[in-house]
Image (cartoon, rainbow, N blue to C red):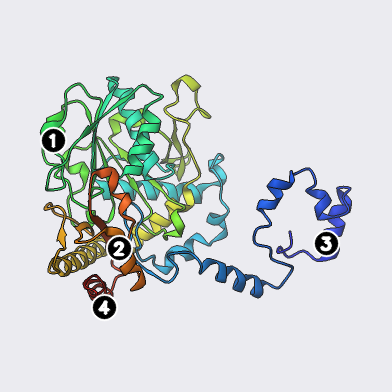
Amino acid sequence: MRYIPNTGSDREEMLAAIGRSSIEELFSDIPEPVLKRFRLLGLPPRSEIEVASEIGELASANEGAGLIPFLGGGVYDHYVPSIVAHILSRPEFYTAYTPYQPEVSQGTLTAMFEFQTLVCELYGMEVANASMYDGATALAEAALMAERINRRGRIAVARTIFPHYRRVLETYCWPAGISLVDLPYSRTGRFDPADVPDRISALIVQTPNALGVIEDLAGMKERIGDALLVVSAYPPPFGLIEPPGRFGADVVVGEGQPLGLPLGFGGPLLGLFATRKDYLRQMPGRIAGRTVDADGNVGYVMAAQTREQHIRRARATSNICTNSALCALAAAVYLASLGSSGLRRLAGLNLEKAHYLAAGISELDGYELAFTGPFFNEFVVRTPEEPDSVRERLRRAGFLVSPADHLEPLGVERGIRIAVTEKRTRDELDRFVAALKGEG
């Protein structure tokens, strides 16, 4: 209440209208331990510029403040064009809620439809939804969808998916009675499709995977027959390489954060979910569609809403359905602003810069790439000393990489994961190598 633009007399008038004499009395029903959590900052009444300065000082105490991020593992430091924030800040989008009334939500529904179209083009799929929380839950929903279709109670999972995706997947599958079969990977950093067992509802694979390696999807769908091929796909590489849909993927999911959303200390995120028309009724979430009215005018509607709030509970595919429209709009504006040529250039920059850094690191004594498979903009390096010591040396030099324990669930020892995006300059890459070498 202290930092919203109400005068003292405004507050007194509002309090009098509800029979309270003070702000403290207004919140007196809230237990003191709960109220205490909201007083941690301890900021006395002061001007906006003073508050901003104080908050800035507190934010600078974070570990990553001022460090150049080479972080990966699902969230990446990509450049966000200024047009994204400009469009998102428009009040008709910024304050929009779920479009329950299509006649007054045409702008929101249009944006959702365009987002879905762009996701389909990106992944080479036929239909996409617009209501997933993040990449991890989108993958888990894909697993439940596959089980609804095939009902075999077993799903094969490449061990090379992100460990936190694997944990979410297990959380969803365990109460549904679905067992998960982990598939090992080789020195290439890829799993072997020959290890996939029979009688499964789906095979789940990620590309590029948690080791940074691009999985070979060719022939994978043919190997598993009528089981669903579910691919968790990091979006930027598909400016250069063939999308999963070209290899027969039945469901493609992904994390939309690289498409116009900042790092944001882990959020907000955006789940991408696309499939084939045959599975439309089994897809979770909601779909915006384009139609015409009685006079032939183009209009947009909610074409499918398969959640428990909209149809009989027993027929609902899921209860997941959030207003991800603002994050989806960011992704749509981002992709539209880049276009196909821009996305290709973006992918090329990520690829070139990552391989430039990997080559420089590989020349250092004791350092080597952990896997031989092709990678995009993320890779794992084995270190001649304890990874935590290497990470600390990089931190002192102004660089931030993921903790070594992020790789432990994958069975990687003495390794660090490094992600390079288009934002990293050649000077930063050279200084990174120098820091590893102990120079500077």
Report the quarter where the C terminus lies.
bottom left
Disc 3 and disc 1: Cα gap in Å? 68 Å
Amino acid bearing label 2: Ser
Query: In this image, 11 relative to 84: left or right?
Result: right
Q: Which residue is mark 3?
A: 10
The residue at which mark 1 appears reads as: 193
Dot 4 amino acid type? Asp
Between the C-alphas of marks 3 and 2, the distance is 57 Å
Choose top left, top right, bottom left or bottom right for residue 152.
top left
Q: Does residue 80 appear anywhere in the picture?
A: yes
Q: Nearer the viewer, mark 4 or mark 2?
A: 2
Who comes first in sequence, dot 3 or dot 1?
3
Which of the two discs, 1 and 2, labels the residue nearer the N terminus?
1
x, y (%) of residue 41? 65, 62
Answer yes or no: is residue 398 visible. Answer: no
Q: Amino acid at mark 3?
A: Asp
Secondary structure of the residue carrying tag 3 is: helix
Please state if 270 lies on the left or on the right of 391 as rendered. Answer: right
| Gap between marks 4 and 1 measured at Cα | 41 Å
**Residue placed under numbered mark 2 in the picture:** 389
Mark 2 nearby-residue class (10 Å; few <14, some 14–19, many ≥20): few
Image position, residue 223 (x, y; %): 12, 31
State which mark lies toward you, 1 or 2. 2
Question: Residue 74, position in %: x, y?
Answer: 33, 51
Q: Looking at numbered disc 1 in the image, what kind of residue is underneath it?
A: Pro
Tell me which numbered mark, 3 or 2, is placed earlier along the sequence: 3
